[in-house]
Image: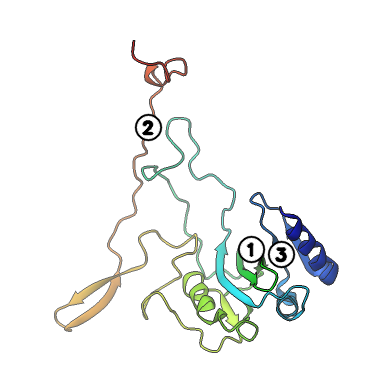
């Protein structure tokens, strides 16, 4: 990480103490984790105070850490990456659960300081509540309006204090939130034109879940290490 970012990290930690926690990075970028109750205080200071000057919100995105770090395809007989892998997925976790894991959903804010030419990422977990909820930062960065609507639409995260929290990418009658890890791959409903009613209607999805056959790399002499790079002749 650059010396300027290290200096910025030290200034922020000195300013906010245990309200922020530094997240390890392998790509030379600065990410800080902020408590949900401290988000507004920290965000306001990062925008207004001259040492920081993060007056531009570049993006807001949601993250679903359900099953984070687990391998859904563990085998020595097939590749674990690529379009053709096959996966037996576990049962769907219903949104009607009483509460979520406290570190399942997170909201990530990408900030830019024009005067200092520095970038900063803030990550805030939504806690255990269902639906997940967090304070809106529209009053701090007005550009968060549509970003927060996208996060709400795709992840179902509510933003308290948002002036107009409606879906923005999916249709009006869409069921569920498609970027959640437990959202069915085939969806919940499909569009159908009803001739009797003379309009487009929704009906339960008719696609049956299936597991694709994985691409298998056979263990034979074609893949022997001592033959792999040998030229013909």
Residue 62 badge = none
Please tell me which residue is depicted at 73% across the width and 81% down the height of the picture: 48
Please tell me which residue is depicted at 56% across the width and 58% down the height of the picture: 66
Secondary structure found at label 2: loop
Secondary structure found at label 1: loop
Residue 216 badge = 2
Nearer to the camera, 26 or 191: 26
Give the image location of residue 110, x and y in percent: 61, 68
Give the image location of residue 107, x and y in percent: 60, 69
Mark 1 and mark 3: span between their CA atoms? 17 Å
Nearer to the camera, 156 or 97: 156
Residue at the spot of label 3: 33
Residue at the spot of label 1: 101
Nearest-to-viewer mark from 3 and 2: 3
Q: For the residues labelled 1 and 2, say whether their Cβ atoms are less than 8 Å apart.
A: no
Secondary structure found at label 3: strand
């Amino acid at each position: 990480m650059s010396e300027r970012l290290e200096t910025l990290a030290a200034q922020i930690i000195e300013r906010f103490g245990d309200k922020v926690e530094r997240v390890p990075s392998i790509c030379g970028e600065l990410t800080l984790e902020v408590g949900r109750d401290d988000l507004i205080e920290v965000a306001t200071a990062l925008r207004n105070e001259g040492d920081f000057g993060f007056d531009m919100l570049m993006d807001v995105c949601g993250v679903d850490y359900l099953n984070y770090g687990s391998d859904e395809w563990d085998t020595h007989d097939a590749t674990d990456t690529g379009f053709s892998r096959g996966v037996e997925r576990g049962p769907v976790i219903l949104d009607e659960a009483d509460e979520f894991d406290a570190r399942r959903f997170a909201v990530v804010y990408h900030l830019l300081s024009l005067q200092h030419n520095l970038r900063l990422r803030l990550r805030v977990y939504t806690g255990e509540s269902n639906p997940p909820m967090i304070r809106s930062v529209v009053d701090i960065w007005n550009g968060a309006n549509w970003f927060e609507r996208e996060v709400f639409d795709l992840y179902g995260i509510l933003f308290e204090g948002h002036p107009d929290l409606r879906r923005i990418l999916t249709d009006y009658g869409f069921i569920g939130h498609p970027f959640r890890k437990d959202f069915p791959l085939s969806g919940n409903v499909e569009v159908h034109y009803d001739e009797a009613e003379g309009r487009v209607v929704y009906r339960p999805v008719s696609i049956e879940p299936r597991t694709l056959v994985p691409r298998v790399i056979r263990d034979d002499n074609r893949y022997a290490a001592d033959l792999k790079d040998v030229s013909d002749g």
